[in-house]
Amino acid sequence: MNISVIGLGKLGLCTAACFASKGHRVIGVDTNQHVLDQLRLKQCPIDEPGLEEFLGKSWGNLTVTDNACEAISNSEITLIIVPTPSRSDGKFANKYIENVLESLAPALKKKDSFHVIDVVSTIMPGSCDSRFKPLLERISGKPCGVDFGLVYNPEFIALGSVIKDFLNPDMVLIGASDKRSGDMAKELYLSTCESSPVIKVMSLINAEITKLSLNCFVTMKISFANELASICEKVPGADIDAITDALGSDTRISSKYLKGGLGFGGPCFPRDNQAFQAFARESGIEPRLGPQVVAINNCVVDRLFDIISKNTNPGDKIALLGLSYKSGTYIIEESQSIMLAKSLIDSGFVVSVHDPKAMSAAKDVLGDNAVYFDDPYECIKDAAGIILLTNWQDYEALDWKLAGTLAKDRALLLDSWRVFKNINFEEFRYLGLGIKLNFWGSRNKNYDL
Ligand SMILES: NC(=O)c1ccc[n+]([C@@H]2O[C@H](COP(=O)([O-])OP(=O)(O)OC[C@H]3O[C@@H](n4cnc5c(N)ncnc54)[C@H](O)[C@@H]3O)[C@@H](O)[C@H]2O)c1
């Protein structure tokens, strides 16, 4: 198929590379000249696992331009993957999408053949029918569903595994203005996915609501696991992992995103949650679940802070290992590690930090208030508290005997994901979020949370 992708950012470029690597001819459009220059030099402008390799397989099928009209004229379907920043009321702003639609609509007007406009960006429910469709019909002078089609087709991907998630979805969600457009989007995904996803084709409004609901449901699972973890911390013998492992084996629940640990962060979950609440209010319903999910999420940082302040003193060096909102990415947006760093700094701790990918992003936010180490052992040296935050595998592989000799005697080792819960460190006072293992069959030594 001839495809155009408008917006070659973290999601758009991966999408373009996946389609092109599967043999589709892709025209990529972006207004960022630096991105276009790098792609013209066959260089990968974005740090995302697998992207460079997929671009390597794509160059023969991928061209780039800053001209949206050119892309419309030379393709059958156009995916729009531009930013939809959150507004102060929690809703997503449509201005980037509407700019794109205004720039491409004249080409739609001139086109003789049917063309599908496929919005992938995360949007507020109602946007397609109330904003995008009228705008396109007004400028093109053509009726939607007859001369062109409108599709809403969000991706359920996570940064750090965008390519894998894109090629192996559980479900492809397609909201369509008409059957022909829905069928075209379906054909495109069936020809590209490596899994055998369920394909759900529905109305535009239902797809818009489904996208937001799905992400909010996932955040609800995360907060459920974290509330359970906070209870387990108070109950002798309780171990969150034993419980969530059993819960997750029930197919009504499933184990994904059901692990006590840090809360959710990043560029999608927190803002999708806020947008869902704004959507509920706009619809005349006061949301009750969403605010609680957020409140529980915010408590995780408070719990970490309390444990650290009980076990160390202001002025102590606290080593934070892992700053990105999850492993596999440099993104620190809404990262709980960064929130914890700020709280500790404000309370007079000396905060030393390490992350395999997120150091430069963290420097932009924490500035001179933290001490940055490229070497995790240097970060740990003389620390009174070592806090394992983002669950990068790199930290599991550290020589913890050596770390114990470098840190202060009997330093606190606080393990957000309980990676080391079965190891009896002599060197550290070990605590894990979600466990109070001083009961039978558990660790010999432990300390009060
Ligand atoms: N990144 C994710 O994990 C993810 C996941 C699901 C959904 N989304 C959604 O996808 C959308 C894009 O997210 P992203 O993370 O890829 O954003 P991004 O900021 O990484 O990339 C957006 C790209 O769009 C380009 N752009 C802006 N205006 C343009 C225009 N008028 N014409 C052409 N290009 C233009 C920018 O230059 C940039 O390269 C957002 O709505 C986001 O919520 C992202």
Image (tube, rainbow, N blue to C red):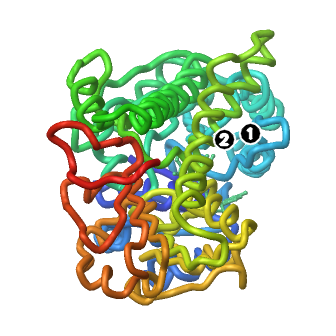
* x and y percentages locating residue 213 in the rendered image: 55, 24
Q: Residue at x 50, y 69 (%)?
A: 330
> Few, some or many C-alpha atoms within 10 Å of disc 2 (few <14, some 14-19, many ≥20)?
many
Q: Earlier in the sequence, mark 1 or mark 2?
A: 1
Q: Amino acid at mark 2?
A: Arg
For this view, does 287 lie left or right of residue 181? Answer: right
Determine which residue is flagged by label 1. Answer: 92
* x and y percentages locating residue 214 in the rendered image: 49, 27
Residue 204 in view here: yes
Q: Note whether ligand 1 is within 8 Å of mark 1.
A: yes
Q: Residue at x 52, y 67 (%)?
A: 323
Residue 71 in view here: no
Instruction: Tell me the element at label 2.
Output: helix
**Residues at marks 1 and 2 touching, judged by CB atoms closer than 8 Å:** yes
Instruction: Tell me the element at label 1.
Output: loop
Q: Quadrant of residue 160?
A: bottom left
For this view, does 60 lie left or right of residue 314? Answer: left
